[in-house]
């Protein structure tokens, strides 16, 4: 196995070395679902913006079913709502990793957080644009 910079850090790992959860088949799927639910709960508990966006989605998704004239319109109205939630979760994950690294200020940490915030803002602008285009 190739070594990186003469340290005992393998350059390539086998699948068994990478997989922490060694469950397979249906057990692995159930386990992955559990981890996903833990992530959703953690994000909801720790991120005010995510909570606001969840409640916004609780309003917008039923509204999409009521206001849309066709199935395509419904899908086009609902998809950006989920996109906002997904991007917010990714932004929260980035912020958590940056905060985990250290409390001291670093330019790249600020840039990473700003980029995550910009991604959330863009997804919200996309949601607004799509809703306005379809409903007006």
Image (spheres, grey):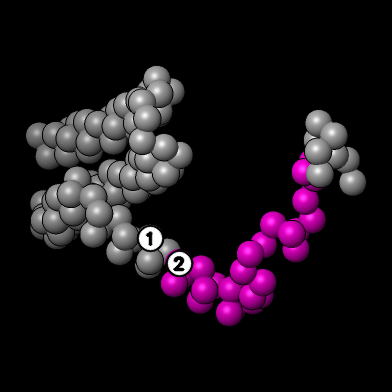
Residue placed under numbered mark 1 in the picture: 39
- Measuring from the top left, give residue 58's x and y in whole percent: 15, 59
Which residue: 62% across, 69% down?
21
> Would residue 123 be seen by someone viewing this image from the given angle?
no
Name the one closer to the observer, 104 or 115: 104
Residue placed under numbered mark 2 in the picture: 35
Q: Residues within 10 Å of mark 1 (few under 14, many from 20)?
A: some
Using residue 128 as the reference point, say whether residue 83 is left or right of it.
right
Contact, mark 2 vs mark 1 (Cβ under 8 Å): yes
Q: Secondary structure at mark 2?
A: helix
Residue 93 badge: none
Relative to 102, does residue 85 appear above or below in the rendering?
Answer: below
The stretch in magenta equals: 9-35
Q: Residues within 10 Å of mark 2 (few under 14, many from 20)?
A: few
- Measuring from the top left, give residue 48's x and y in whole percent: 18, 49
Using residue 134 as the reference point, say whether residue 6 is left or right of it.
right
> In the picture, residue 97 is in which quadrant?
top left
Q: How many marks?
A: 2
Which residue: 30% across, 55% down?
43
Relative to 45, does residue 128 appear above or below in the rendering?
Answer: above
Relative to 96, does residue 25 appear above or below in the rendering?
Answer: below
Magenta run includes residue 15? yes
Name the one closer to the observer, 111 or 32: 111
> Would residue 8 be seen by someone viewing this image from the given angle?
yes
Relative to 81, does residue 122 appear above or below in the rendering?
Answer: above
Magenta run includes residue 18? yes
Quadrant where the C terminus lies?
top left
Which residue: 36% across, 35% down?
103
Which residue: 25% across, 54% down?
46
> In the picture, residue 128 is in which quadrant?
top left
> In the picture, residue 45 is in which quadrant?
bottom left
Q: CA distance from mark 2 to mark 1?
A: 6 Å
């Amino acid at each position: 196995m190739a070594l990186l910079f003469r340290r005992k850090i393998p350059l390539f790992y086998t699948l068994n070395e990478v997989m922490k959860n060694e469950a397979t088949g249906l057990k692995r799927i159930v386990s992955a679902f559990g981890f996903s639910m833990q992530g959703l709960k953690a994000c909801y508990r720790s991120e005010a913006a995510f909570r606001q966006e969840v409640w916004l989605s609780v309003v917008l998704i039923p509204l999409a079913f009521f206001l849309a004239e066709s199935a395509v319109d419904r899908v086009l109205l609902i998809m950006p709502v989920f996109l906002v939630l997904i991007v917010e979760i990714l932004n929260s994950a980035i912020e958590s990793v940056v905060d985990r690294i250290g409390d001291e200020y670093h330019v790249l940490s600020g840039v990473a957080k700003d980029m995550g915030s910009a991604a959330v803002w863009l997804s919200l602008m996309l949601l607004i644009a799509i809703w306005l285009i379809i409903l007006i």
